[in-house]
Image (tube, coloured by chain):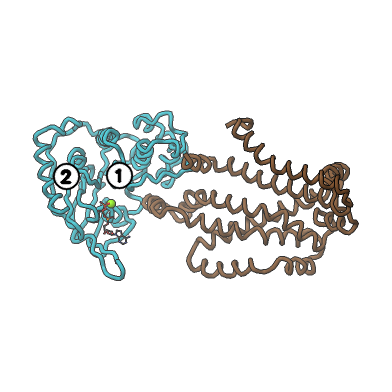
Chain colours: A cyan, B brown
Amino acid sequence: MARVALANQRVSAHATVTAAGVYKSYRLDGEPLPVLEDVSFEIGSGEFVSFVGPSGSGKSTLLNLLAGLEEPDRGRITISGSTDRLGHAAYMPQKDLLLPWRSALDNAVLGMEVHGVPREDARHRAREMFEIAGLAGFERSLPAALSGGMRQRVAFLRTVLTPGSVMLLDEPFGALDSLTRSELQEWLMRMWERLSTTVVLVTHDVEEALLLSDRVYVMTRRPGRIKLVHEVGLPRPRSLEVLDSEEFVRSKSALLRAVRGEV
Amino acid sequence: MSVFSVPRLRAFVLAVLPVLAFLIVWEAYVRIAGTDPTVLPSPSRILLTTFDSLGVLLVNTRQTLIEAGVGMGIALVAGCALGALIAASPMLRRMLYPPLVVSQTIPMIALAPLLVIWFGFGILPKLLVVALVTFFPIVVSVADGLASTEPEMIRLLQSMGASRWQIFWKVRAPGSLPYLFSGVKISITYAVIGAIFAEYVGAFQGLGILMQNAKNSYRADLMFSAILVTAVLSVGMFLAVVGLEKLLIPWHARSTQREEG
Ligand SMILES: Nc1ncnc2c1ncn2[C@@H]1O[C@H](COP(=O)(O)OP(=O)(O)OP(=O)(O)O)[C@@H](O)[C@H]1O
Ligand SMILES: [Mg+2]
């Protein structure tokens, strides 16, 4: 397993993510709407885990909680052992959310900029990544001039470049055609192998979860609980070929059964 | 697209044609009916007067232009500040919005003479009138523009650990610029008229005074010349804003073009 950390990436040995007895509810017309119930998990430093579950099971809510944008009603959430989470994870919401007035390159450096990385330094790092992401030559393009897949890649670069040793990805490839999708999945896999960051991925797609993750959590229908934890035994480094392996097919049907039971 | 492309030329010809037709009918009517030039001068006579009085027109235009420009500048600074305050908190919004709307109902025809009584015949009351008639669209557009930021965008920045200040300057302020320009485009068309109106109430110089003098000496031709200059001035300032918009927020022009297909 070649998991070499890039020298220019801040890698923490303590990039753990934990949730213990987390409850979260919203209010809907004055009535409490429970969204998450008794959610607990521990994600080790450098692990890649996925959450799958039906729509409305609270997956995005969970990522918002992990990112520190919201606090649980009960329970405790930590990143690297601390409940102080804002600014400690690189969060990629489902929408690309590129700033239309910034070039692709300047969008990619946004996270570093917020963290006070010197401008030239940040741009230099981003430029290197543009090569890897197949975006070379589009550094100065405005988002309006990029295709959907390219915008998604810029948003992904922004996430990867944002300082922090935890990545939270909310259906990062949801809006893409299947070809671009598998391209980006493979690219994410290579990226993760090199960066050794902790990744929490939310997805609808069981195949995607299995292909990428060390562990898959299946959520129940709202209120979301963890229904099933599946350790993925597929060897690393993986390629798209594992999709045809026996182990993969078996895991997939088990997971699908668990998810379907909920839809 | 080049300035001289065929569609543009076509658009220009289409825009000019009715004006030209109107001027020809006007000229013909004055010549055939032989109207008194102190009542209705012909377009050709107006054009001649404009050239003959170029000196006096320019001196007065310069004065009006300064008043309109500086007044707009004041409105811009005050409007952005007020707009930012209104967008900053719901409490400030509730405190500031109603008096602002009420302020717009005060008739300028009553306020302008008062301003002259208070501040004299100098430039100050003109600047105030221009600023007062132009700042409201700017306040509204800035407040709306700052409030238009996608909440998800703000949350993304928060997740990065950004401060309110960083979110304002990196996301909200640039995102409000297209709104600001819409406001300024409305405002700028009031600026010259506002300045002229303020001069009319009492001034030493300016297109408003020129018009008053032309009226008092039965120089309808000079009056029309002043109107012509006013129109050119207003359109010029409007085009300057459009040019500035293309220069400063090219990304906006680009994204709207894309939406139009
Ligand atoms: N800010 C909020 N206020 C009120 N209700 C909310 C809020 N955010 C989420 N909800 C509710 O919580 C539930 C879970 O929403 P969430 O977005 O977490 O689901 P999800 O699993 O991400 O769904 P999907 O797969 O469709 O994205 C939904 O019923 C939603 O209506
Ligand atoms: Mg979601």
Where residue A179 sits: x, y (%)? 27, 33
Where residue A118 sits: x, y (%)? 46, 41
- Which residue sits at x=17%, y=46%? A216
Q: Secondary structure at mark 2?
A: strand
The kind of residue on which mark 1 rests is Ser
Q: CA distance from mark 1 to mark 2?
A: 18 Å
The quadrant in which residue A7 appears is top left
- Quadrant placement of the N terminus of chain B: top right
Task: Please tell me how crowded label 1 is: few (under 14), some (14-19), or many (20+) other residues with Cα within 10 Å.
Answer: many
Of B220 and A43, which appears nearest the observer? B220
Please determine whether, in this image, residue B194 is positioned above or below residue B178.
below
Q: Quadrant of ligand 1?
A: bottom left
Residue A129 visible from this viewpoint: yes
The kind of residue on which mark 2 rests is Arg
Where residue B87 sits: x, y (%)? 51, 61
Q: Secondary structure at mark 1?
A: loop
Q: Are marks 1 and 2 on the same chain?
A: yes
Q: Which residue is mark 2?
A: A215
Where residue B201 sits: x, y (%)? 80, 63
For this view, does B223 lie left or right of residue A83?
right
Do tag 1 and tag 2 residues touch (Cβ < 8 Å)?
no
